[in-house]
Each structure stands twice: as structure tokens, then as C-alpha cells.
Image (cartoon, coloured by chain):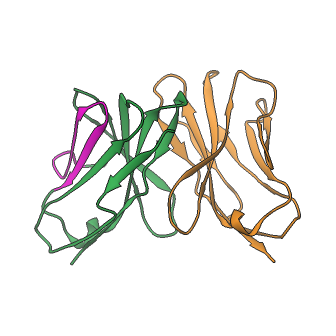
Amino acid sequence: AQTVTQSQPEMSVQEAETVTLSCTYDTSENNYYLFWYKQPPSRQMILVIRQEAYKQQNATENRFSVNFQKAAKSFSLKISDSQLGDTAMYFCAFMSGNNNDMRFGAGTRLTVKP
Amino acid sequence: GAVVSQHPSWVICKSGTSVKIECRSLDFQATTMFWYRQFPKQSLMLMATSNEGSKATYEQGVEKDKFLINHASLTLSTLTVTSAHPEDSSFYICSARGGGGRETQYFGPGTRLLVL
């Protein structure tokens, strides 16, 4: 079974600075997808960024980018120029390419301070 | 695009009653929908996966007779919590796969259930 580990329960960052959230996963599969979801206080899950395992290039979405290290099974999220609206829970998720089940990490609570 | 709605957004019910939660994909057809449960300050726990027109697949430890799932159309799945008890109080979230990519799940806003 796949597991997703987020080792940072809480993090904080000053507005406009950069922060990196860690995520590691365990799988024996070669075809899979990785995601970062944001859950603000409203509790609506919002897709931040996604990465296909077969792509070597790291995904980027505006201020959000990932460092995908397939051999190390690591998938960290970097948020640049942090904004107050980035304050939320961030969940790393793994989805198998075989059965499409999505598994979430425990989450990291990020607080952006003014 | 890729909008998923849930109804109701919150519900309070008496112990022993049944509660139905609807999940709809508004602008795409979702062949697969997922139901999650989230306790306070915890992660999402997958309860079941439902495919349109077939029986749902439940995760280990989730009672299928307790949590009835119906996925009768490509845009609607329902979760019915039967004979609800206080320990069923939780935040229930659905997601649907489709829209921008088959491998991306789009989430509904969630339903907060409180059983008295």
C-alpha cells in the first residue's frame, strides 16, 4: 500500500518570503501522479499543482513549484512571494496510475504572517 | 470549469435518523466519484469509490450498510448515512474525477454532519 508522509505539522513564513513544504511517499509503482491540495478555513479542497511521475520536469504554477525527486520519492512544494491568502492546510497526495485511488498525507498547516 | 457541488453544506440530525448527502459535478461528466471523511485537524480518509452504474467499492473498515452510496448518473452521487449516531458526526467531502484530466480529482465544498 502506498503511504504519504508530511513530516511538518505546522510551518510559518513571513509575507513575501519563500517557504518549502516537504512530502515523501512510498510506492513500488512506476506510473503514478502526485498532487498538492490547499484547504483554507472554508475547508474547500483546492488543487494547487500536479505532477506526472513520468515527467522529469518539475511542475510550476505561478508562485508554486515542486521539487520532484523520483528516486528519493520526494515531492516538496515551494511557495514563493508568500501571500496572506496562502494561509491554509496543505495536503500532499499520491494517486496510483493503476487503480486511481488517491492517498493523502497528514497535512501541513501553513501560516503566512504579515 | 471542473466544479463540484455538495448539498447540504451542513446538517444537524437526531440519533437514529438517516441523512442523505448529494454530490454533483456541474460542468463535466464524472465516471468516478469518491467519498471522504475528515475529522477535525486530520487528513482526508477515503471511504469509498463509486463508479457510475455499478456498486461502490468500500475501503476496509467502512460499513457499506451504514454508508450507502449511489452513483446513478454521470453527474450525481449520493451518500446516505443510515441510522446516524453521534460518532458519525464529521466532515464529509466528495470528489469527482474528470474535467481537466482523468487523473485529477476535483472536490466539493464538503458537508458538516452533526448527530445529536
What colour has chain A?
orange
Q: Tell me, yes or no, if residue B60 can be seen here.
A: no
Residue range highlighted in magenta: B63-81
What is the quadrant of the C terminus of chain A in the image? bottom right
**Chain with colour green in the figure:** B
Q: Is residue B56 left or right of residue B102?
A: left
Main SS class of the magenta portion in the image: strand
Residue B14: name its quadrant: bottom left
Quick check: B110 above or below B75?
A: below
Q: Position of residue B69 (x, y in %)?
A: 22, 43
Q: Is residue A21 left or right of residue B54?
A: right
Quick check: B98 above or below A21?
A: above
Camera-side residue of A111 and B73: B73
Q: Position of residue A95 (x, y in %)?
A: 55, 34
Camera-side residue of B63 and B37: B37
Residue A25: name its quadrant: top right
Q: Is residue B42 left or right of residue B31?
A: right
Q: Tell me, yes or no, if residue A84 can be seen here.
A: yes
Q: Residue at x 14, y 57 (%)?
A: B82
Camera-side residue of B20 and B24: B24
